[in-house]
Amino acid sequence: MWPIIFLKSSIGKKWVMACTGLCLIFFLFSHAAGNATLFYSTSLFQSYADQLHSHPLIVSLFSKGLFAVFAIHIITGILLFLQNRKARPQKYKVHKRAFKNSIASRTMIYSGLFILLFAVIHTAAVSFGDHGVIAHTVSTMFSSFVLSMFYIVAFVVLALHISHGLWSMLQTFGVNHPRYTWIIHKITYAVPLFFLLLFGAIPFLFLFGSGN
Amino acid sequence: MSEIDISLEIWRQKDSLASGVFETYSLQRISTDMSFLEMLDVLNEQLTREGKDPVAFDHDCREGICGMCGAVVNGIAHGPEPETTLCQLHMRHFKSGDTIVIEPFRSRVFLPIKDLMVDRSGFDRIIQAGGYVSVNTGGTPDANAIPVPSTTAELAMDAAACIGCGACVASCPNGAAMLFTGAKIAQLSLLPQGQQERKERALSMVAAMDNEGFGNCTNERECETVCPKGISIRNIARMNSEYFKASFFS
């Protein structure tokens, strides 16, 4: 069966990583759009959340789909990591990287696992907070300096993960041509930076008391 | 002509079953005009005179075109000079007093044979799976009988420059052979002669690559950085797209 052969192949797994990664980036854009209401007021954010939860079927389908995509992305990533470790069983005595500036690519599995940890903590924090009043939960959460710092570190890690992930995704889709190099270069910096600035500004908003 | 004194730490392994160790050797008055392999020849003459086993290493043309030589020198496949095979690396790039660590290409697929020699027949099996054109070409055709745009011809030639040395696999943290496989798939997919078997080739070569047990590319770009022929990872992107199209539309 060709779909199974494709999915079991090395390139098929890369396509799975790329497609699920793209879905997760779309999710982040929608999440960012919702969170952006906080910059106006917490009451607007609350009404956005209430409006969203007034469609339980959509929320339920969307969250289940998101969970599935996230799980596939993580499981495939771990599978690839384990396969890759097996392919290079013996280390070199002198270990030198020929290509510079590849911190993001080197740490994809670790940044990914950190994002998973963050996602679990974040989901637990917003789910078990002040039920129904999300604006209050957010405000309480970010009044804690330690938790705010954890969020900011997580956003930095997320930006690092996306910067390499986005580039890898385009490479997997076969989008790598001198004609597009400049735009690919800009996108792989602009998108993670956008998420870092937008999400990262929220804890600061509450820490410095301008969140209302 | 200047001369340098160097110290070598070389991986010695009696055969594929034996466990290897690093051994240290000193070489005096090595001409900086020597190639790296000539320096190893001098070491081997010294070892032979001492009644010791010379260091086994692969080599053939010593002109940087055959792809036979290759070792990891101070952590970099083919040594510190960009786009240079080990045989074309010269001792002028080292200083007197340097310690040079020489290791074989390491990968689960490249099994050790002896010392610095490894079995790279996994590459041959990938090529056997589809890295050829099996159309009957008849007599010598006119060079311009099939028009190919110059940019396409250049891209195909860039990919065809791969000498199959295995440095890409050796340098890849995942032991992936995607630069090698991608280069051949890209080369033949760009040229008119490669069109008939284009989809079949992508499917077979990727399957052969996976069967060998090579790792998966995570786009760390180590391969293209150490490649002595400067093969770009754009060829991997082309292979990804070729494989997708072949899987879904053939």
Image: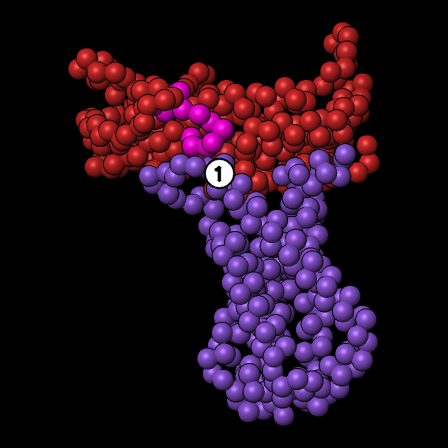
Chain colours: A purple, B red
Q: Quadrant of residue B161?
A: top right
Quadrant hosting residue A68: bottom right
Expressed as whole percent of the image width and height from the top left, the position of residue B48 reads 22, 13
Name the image quarter holding the C terminus of chain A.
Answer: bottom right
Q: Chain of mark 1?
A: A
Residue of label 1:
A86
B216 vs B132: above or below: below
Q: Is residue A176 visible?
A: no
Image spot of residue B123 (x, y percent) = 55, 24
Side (left or right) of B186 relative to A205: right
Left or right: residue A126 versus residue B136 is left
x%, y% of residue A182?
65, 54
Decide whether residue B116 is among the magenta residues. yes
Task: Report the magenta residues as a range.
Answer: B105-117
Q: Nearer the viewer, residue A153 or B153?
A: A153
Work out which quarter of the rendered image holds the N terminus of chain A and state it.
top right
Q: Nearer the viewer, residue A123 or A18?
A: A123
- Magenta part mainly helix, strand or loop? loop
Q: Is residue A205 left or right of residue B226?
A: right
Residue extending farthest to the left is B50
In the image: residue A84, left or right of residue B147: left
The residue shown at (25%, 21%) is: B43
Q: Secondary structure at mark 1?
A: helix
